[in-house]
């Protein structure tokens, strides 16, 4: 890992954010695969046969893209995120941004197919039955009336979190593909890597974070569910730990742990990079290594608002099998 902690955030962004820009020829190749996939069978994303076709077609993504995805899976780098730019999205006019709550994509479109093709080269696509009705491709759009909510339908600052931190089988990777930026291009997906934040904490704080002195409850996007048993926020190798925290819903069980959690939040915020996604860009986040949040923006609910599509990826389809009734892609 290169060390770039003493440069300004913007320089660090340029240096550190793993960015891969597709060439024109690569964009055409991805577009042709996505079009084939969108018209495969009934184009139903949750249909096992469609997903089989998607997996097969994903093997024909451009070699340079396959290399980048494979390298990211091996090691997500200091930032824990990969930005893909120049994806074939927005070349045809896009429909209006959905406005309804819990909007999802059930029928394949070219943008949804692009996300699926890329996700399937990183691992297995999964969803959670209690969230966005178990859809594999979910729309992240602002929803009227939910402005102030700590969910991806809100537009106030969204607190740093690991996706589904409360779940024993949370995603290994999260993919966010941008169809449309917000009107003022203000909204940034904030990426905060534990690899960058850790040097800002002293050894005793890290030790506390490795102890089971925290609990996490399900976020609002889930139906009410049980709070986790006490868990550590950092686990695994002390020199390169995994992180599991959601600063909106993770609670410390004692005063010392509460203070340490607050210092971790400060370290994370100080290391965070805003990724302002533009049309045709996709950010892949390693959900074991980075927290993400979102800066505020002003929705208009006019069909031209910010529109991302989200996918979740697991590396190991056996480890999660106990949660996947019938062997499908949806976890209970
Ligand atoms: O809107 C964003 O950039 C991120 C929202 C988010 O946290 C999510 O969809 O999981
Ligand atoms: Fe999230």
Image (cartoon, rainbow, N blue to C red):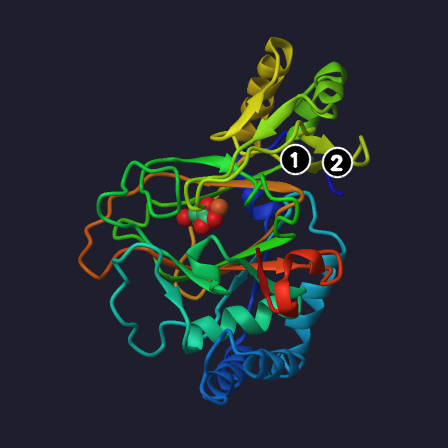
Instruction: State the SS at label 1.
Output: helix
Position of residue 18 relative to residue 203, above or below, is: below
Q: Quadrant of the N terminus?
A: top right
Q: Residues within 10 Å of mark 2 (few under 14, many from 20)?
A: some
Indicate the position of residue 138 as horizontal and vertical percent values. Answer: 43, 61
Residue drawn where x is 49% and y is 90% of the image: 41
Indicate the position of residue 279 as horizontal and vertical percent values. Answer: 39, 63
- Judge: label 2 CB < 8 Å from ligand 2: no
Mark before the other along the chain sequence, 2 or 1:
1
Position of residue 320 relative to residue 246, above or below, is: below
Would residue 58 be visible to someone looking at this image?
yes
Instruction: State the SS at label 2.
Output: loop
Residue drawn where x is 66% and y is 64% of the image: 122
Query: How far separated are the C-alphas under marks 2 and 1?
Result: 8 Å
Residue named by callout 1:
194
User: Of residues 315 and 71, which is closer to you in this image?
Assistant: 315
Q: Is residue 195 left or right of residue 128?
A: right
Q: Residues within 10 Å of mark 1 (few under 14, many from 20)?
A: many
Residue named by callout 2:
241
Residue drawn where x is 61% and y is 42% of the image: 290
Indicate the position of residue 87 as horizontal and vertical percent values. Answer: 48, 70
Indicate the position of residue 15 as horizontal and vertical percent values. Answer: 61, 46
Instruction: Evaluate if marks 2 and 1 touch, with contact meaning CB atoms under 8 Å apart.
Output: yes
């Amino acid at each position: 890992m290169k060390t770039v902690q003493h440069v300004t955030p913007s320089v660090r962004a340029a240096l550190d954010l793993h960015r891969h820009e597709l060439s024109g020829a690569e964009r055409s190749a991805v577009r042709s695969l996505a079009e084939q996939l969108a018209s495969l069978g009934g184009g139903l994303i949750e249909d096992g046969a469609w997903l089989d076709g998607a997996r097969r077609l994903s093997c024909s993504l451009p070699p340079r893209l396959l290399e980048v995805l494979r390298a990211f899976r091996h090691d997500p780098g200091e930032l824990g995120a990969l930005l893909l730019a120049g994806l074939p999205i927005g070349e045809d006019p896009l429909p209006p941004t959905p406005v309804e709550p819990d909007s999802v994509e059930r029928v394949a479109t070219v943008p949804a197919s692009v996300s699926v093709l890329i996700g399937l080269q990183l691992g297995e696509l999964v969803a959670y039955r209690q969230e966005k009705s178990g859809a594999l491709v979910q729309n992240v759009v602002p929803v009227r009336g939910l402005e102030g909510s700590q969910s991806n339908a809100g537009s106030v600052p969204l607190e740093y979190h690991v996706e589904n931190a409360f779940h024993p089988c949370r995603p290994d990777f999260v993919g966010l593909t941008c169809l449309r930026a917000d009107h003022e291009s203000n909204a940034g997906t904030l990426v905060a890597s534990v690899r960058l934040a850790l040097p800002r904490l002293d050894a005793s704080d890290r030790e506390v974070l490795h102890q089971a002195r925290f609990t996490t409850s399900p976020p609002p996007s889930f139906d009410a569910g049980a709070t986790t048993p006490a868990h550590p926020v950092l686990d695994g190798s002390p020199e390169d730990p995994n992180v599991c925290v959601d600063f909106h819903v993770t609670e410390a069980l004692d005063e010392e742990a509460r203070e340490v959690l607050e210092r971790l939040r400060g370290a994370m915020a100080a290391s965070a990079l805003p990724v302002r996604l533009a049309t045709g860009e996709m950010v892949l986040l390693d959900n074991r290594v980075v927290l993400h949040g979102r800066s505020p923006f002003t929705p208009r609910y006019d069909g031209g608002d910010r529109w991302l599509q989200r996918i979740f990826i697991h590396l190991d389809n056996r480890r999660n099998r106990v949660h996947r009734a019938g062997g499908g892609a949806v976890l209970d």
